[in-house]
Image: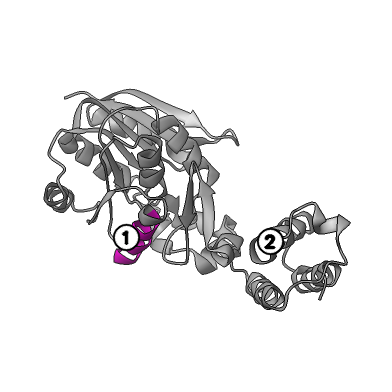
Amino acid sequence: MNIKEFKAYARDRLASSLEQPEQRFLVSALLAHFAGIPNYWYHTHEEHTLPPAAEKALLKAVDQATLGRPLQYILGFVHFGNCRIGVDERVLIPRPETEEMWDRARHIPGLVLDACTGSGCLAIALKKARPLTNVYAFDLSRDALDVASQNAALNQVKVHFFLADLTDISGVEEAAQEAGLQKQTASLLISNPPYVTESQKKGMSGRVLSFEPHSALFVTDNDPLCHYRQLAALGSRLLCSEGTLMAEINEDFGREAGLLLQQAGYRGVQVHKDLNEKNRIIEARWVP
C-alpha cells in the first residue's frame, strides 16, 4: 500500500464521521506518527510505499478512528507546554485552554499544588518550566496517578503525587502532609476540576462522551460550583498569604465562581477569557 492508497482507504472509512479538513489532519498525523512521513509528502510523495509494519499500524488506527476513538488516544500522547504527555482512556485529554492556564501560572514563583491532576500535565509542565520548584499533585483516581507518574518519568521531572479526593478537605490535608506539603506553604493552588454540567452533555462530541472519563468531566446541575467551593476551602488551609488560586471554569459560571471566591475571603478575583473569548480561567489571591 502506498500513501495514495492509504489516503483513499481512510477517506472511505471516515467519510461518514469526519469532515474533509478533519480527515486530512488525522491522516497526516497518523502517517507522521506510524510511518515517519513528513506532512508535505501528503501530496508530493503519494506513490511512496508504506513499510508492512507501518501499514498494519495505520489500518488499525483508522479502524479505531472509525469507532470514534480520539486521535490523542490513538497516538497515545499530546504535546502540552514544554512536555510530551502520555494519554489513554484513564485520563482526560489536555485541552488548549488548560495549556493557556499553564502559560499564565508558570510565571508565579513558589511551591505548587495541583488538584485533580489527571494526566499530570499541569504539574509536570510547571515543574519542567521551573525545575527548582517543589510541585505536589493529587487525584482521586489511582489509574490517573499511574498515568501521571509515568508522564513525570517520561519528562524526567520529580513531582510529589498523592492519592486524595477534593471533596474531603481533611483527607487532602492529611495526605498532603504525608507527602511533605505543610499548611500555608503553597504559593499556587491550580486545578482543572470537573465542571461540565450534566445538562451540557447533549452538546458534546460523541468522541468525548464515549471515550473520556466522565468522572473528570461532569458535575450535577444542582451544584455546578461544588469543586470551587472545595478549592476555596483547601486554599485557605494550604496557601500562604497572598498565594494564588487558579482554576479552569465553566464559561457559564464565571460571575458565580468569582463571587464564591470573594465570599470565601479571596481578593483580586479575575476571570480570564480563552482564545475563543470564553470565560475559562479564574484567578484570585488568598488574603487571610
Query: Amino acid type of disc 2?
Result: Gly
- Residue 135, visible in the rendered structure: yes
Q: Judge whether 127 appears above or below 213 on screen.
A: above
In which quarter of the view is residue 18 placed? bottom right
Colour convention of the picture = one colour
- Secondary-structure class at tag 2: loop
Residue named by callout 2: 36
Type of amino acid under label 1: Leu
Identify the main secondary structure in magenta.
Answer: helix
Q: With respect to residue 77, does 81 lie above or below? A: above
Residue 114 appears left or right of 251:
left
Residue 219 shows in the view: no
Q: Quadrant of the N terminus?
A: bottom right
What range of the chain is rendered magenta? 141-151
Residue positioned 18% across, 50% down in the render:
172
Residue 241: quadrant of the picture? top left
